[in-house]
Image (cartoon, rainbow, N blue to C red):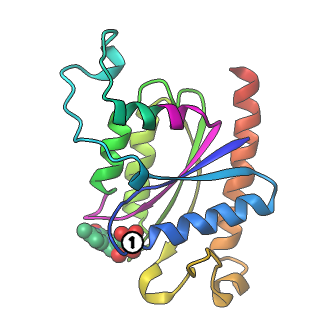
Amino acid sequence: MKLAIIIGTTRQGRQSDKVAKWVELSAKAIDIQAEIVDLKDYPMPFFNEAISPRYNPNRIIDPAVKLWLDKIASFDAYVFVTPEYNHSIPGVLKNAIDYLTVELVHKPSAVVSHGSVGGVRAATDLKEILSESQSVVIPKTATLMNVGMTNAVDENGQLSAELLANPYGPKIHLDNLLKELIWYSDALSAAR
Ligand SMILES: Cc1cc2nc3c(=O)[nH]c(=O)nc-3n(C[C@H](O)[C@H](O)[C@H](O)COP(=O)(O)O)c2cc1C
């Protein structure tokens, strides 16, 4: 399984890159081929195509957008790392998803969220948004509270000792989420 870990914000001083590194470390620890995809590396204009891209056979794709679409298409499974901004996902992530057409179809995706209350409202929204991309959104999520204030994860993606010691904490949730992704990825790639 080739896994993309998408960083859902480009904000200066963001915490989401640490969370993405935590996901990457956890995935690699169970031999998943994982790669972080940073929206900072895919700057795209605000979506302004005249027709919904799914229904536009004559679509002309902006070269900057094509880089994003090709990158996303090259994976089998996805973890979207999203913070919660104003009770939902960051605009930059929604914009990037609005460009997608076939890239996620029949492939599994999962959400890892963080924020003042674990980013749960953003996670709920994102699962619904991804379902319209015809991705198979897996039920399990992993959440982290107040990453910036609590140092839940360090710069290298290491979870704090306190959270690691919690048998009901985020480690077990993320490990279970990744195992589920492998299951869905195997099943769906066989079906595809
Ligand atoms: C513009 C903005 C809006 C936010 N809105 C919410 C919110 O509605 N609910 C919440 O729980 N946290 C909210 N937060 C807190 C963030 O979820 C938290 O700071 C998180 O670390 C942000 O991720 P980032 O550091 O990767 O940008 C907001 C933060 C920002 C910058």
Cβ of mark 1 under 8 Å from ligand 1: the answer is yes
Give left or right: position of 25 versus 96.
right
In which quadrant of the rendered view does residue 52 lie? top left
54 to 95, vertically: above or below? above
Q: Mark 1 points at which residue?
A: 14
Relative depth, front residue between 22 and 45:
45
Residue 17 location (% of width, % of height): 49, 67
Relative depth, front residue between 57 and 169:
57
Q: Is residue 76 magenta?
A: yes
In which quadrant of the rendered view does residue 149 lie? bottom left
Q: In this picture, which residue range is highlighted in magenta?
A: 70-88
The answer to whether residue 92 is visible is yes
The answer to whether residue 143 is visible is no
Give left or right: position of 64 versus 146.
left
Relative depth, front residue between 58 and 62:
62
Q: In which quarter of the image is ligand 1?
A: bottom left
Query: Which residue occupies 33% across, 71% down?
Result: 12
Identified by mark 1, the residue type is: Arg
Quarter of the image with the N terminus in it = top right
Residue 94 location (% of width, % of height): 32, 46
